Amino acid sequence: MALRWRSLPVEGSLRELFAFVAIAFVVTYATLAETMLVTAVASIIVVCVAVAVSLSDIRWAWALYFLAICSSGVQTTVSGLTVRPEYFAAPIFVVALYAHSRRDGTSAARRPVHGGVYIGAAGLVATGLLSSLLVAPEAGASLRMGVQLIVALLAMIPLASVNIDIRTTILWGSVILCTISVASILYFLVDPSRRVSGLAFEYNIMGSLCVGWIGVLYYFADDAKVVTRQVFAMSVPIVIALILTSTRAAWVALGFILLFWAARNVTKQPVTVISSLLAAALAAFYLQEIYYSVGDQDTFLWRVVHVVDIQTGTGAYRVQLWNDALTQIATRDWGVLFGTGLNSFPQFNPVDPTFVAAAYLSSMWLAVLYDVGIVGTIFFLTLATSLFLAVKNRWRAVPLFVALAVCTSVTNIIWFAFPWTLIALVVNASLVGTTVPLRKPKRSARGAHRRRHRLVPS
């Protein structure tokens, strides 16, 4: 059955569209402004307009929030605190979700989020704040990271439990990330010496974001009402941008997703699957031959050949820091239970092995153990396990969780909102469901039912 999208503009859409353009204009002007007064006034205007637009329609609330979590590289520092768009977008989105749930007549039918999610999130934050306050050498710096962790987790539970239209959510998210990816690819074509990072904090974060979104699309792939042809087409630039980030962990994570896809479809589409795997293998061998002819160290081709290399380059650098972290953890007595405070590794290691800057503990798994100890790690594992158990189709969610686990093994993304948001989307589909009426209900003797959604059969 063919499906078509009605034009998205509906009541009040012109006002919202102009408001969105105004926000983009004001943000751009504020970024270029040299005076604090202009920046402050622009920020107030942005927040006010964002609140008004978000409360009027959950679609625009989601668009603003998702754009904000994709823009972790857009930041400023106020009194030592790094401020990012998601700091403002997260509470606004939570309020918008609450307002939407009050308007939505079916929200009462949703199932509650697993209690382990609440326990894990609250315990992780509480342990982190306590150890930061009592143990961290620089309590202020660690407490600021605690604020960032709270912001990252803030919208997760409301998004997982409020009844939203997953189809529109996936469509608009794909449009936003695809637009960022296309712009980044065009910029890369102008200057190929720079790795693609989009609007993210850095290229590893961009790679993790892209592969995480591909994992979400994989989860909904069997539902043609969610992953439409338009959404599938928009995933192509996202994958290209992911590859151009030159983030090897994201490449490995994408490989896991492709292997899951191949395993599920090899009996249905054997020719397509086998051809795709052969093409990927030939491309890898071809790039390897080119590298050994003309490749230099730490280039794109070098990274292709040294995907899992831990003896040279950044791989060896990370392993050295991991060993340092394990050594320091082993020397603690009772301190191993609660850690030394959020993001405290740079405080104990102000100079890294290159003698350039403070050391950065890239592995989230080690960083959690280092920062919040065994107790905090148990709370974190409770949170992660409860989120996975809350997913209805766990086998379909494995690629998403594996992809995020692989990426976070070499880049600590626990402080950012996007991994928790992506997980919340698949949990939402399990607690609320993605099935919504597509056909206009038959009129009954009591009157006609009102059609709520814009995706209708043609």
Image (cartoon, rainbow, N blue to C red):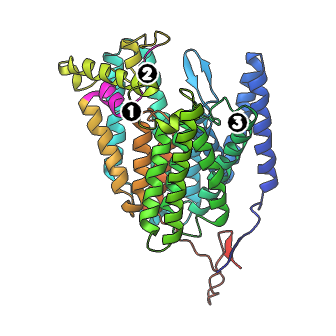
Quarter residue 452 falls in: bottom right
Quarter residue 396 falls in: bottom left
Is 220 displayed left or right of 374 in the figure?
right
Give the residue at x 55% y 15%: 80
Marks 2 & 3, CB-CB < 8 Å contact: no
Mark closer to the observer (2, 3) = 3
The quadrant of the picture occupied by the N terminus is bottom right
The residue tagged 2 is 360
Give the residue at x 63% y 54%: 236
SS at badge 1:
helix
Q: CA distance from mark 1 to mark 3?
A: 29 Å
The residue tagged 3 is 188
Res 4 visible = yes
Question: Quick one: which residue is furthest to the left in this view?
Answer: 333
Residue 241, horizontal then vertical, whole percent? 62, 43
Q: Is residue 67 above or below residue 434?
A: above
Question: Quick one: which residue is furthest to the front in this view?
Answer: 293
The residue tagged 1 is 364
Q: Is residue 419 above or below residue 293?
A: below
Give the residue at x 49% y 65%: 274
Q: Main secondary structure of the magenta part?
A: helix
Task: Magenta stretch: give its range.
Answer: 358-373
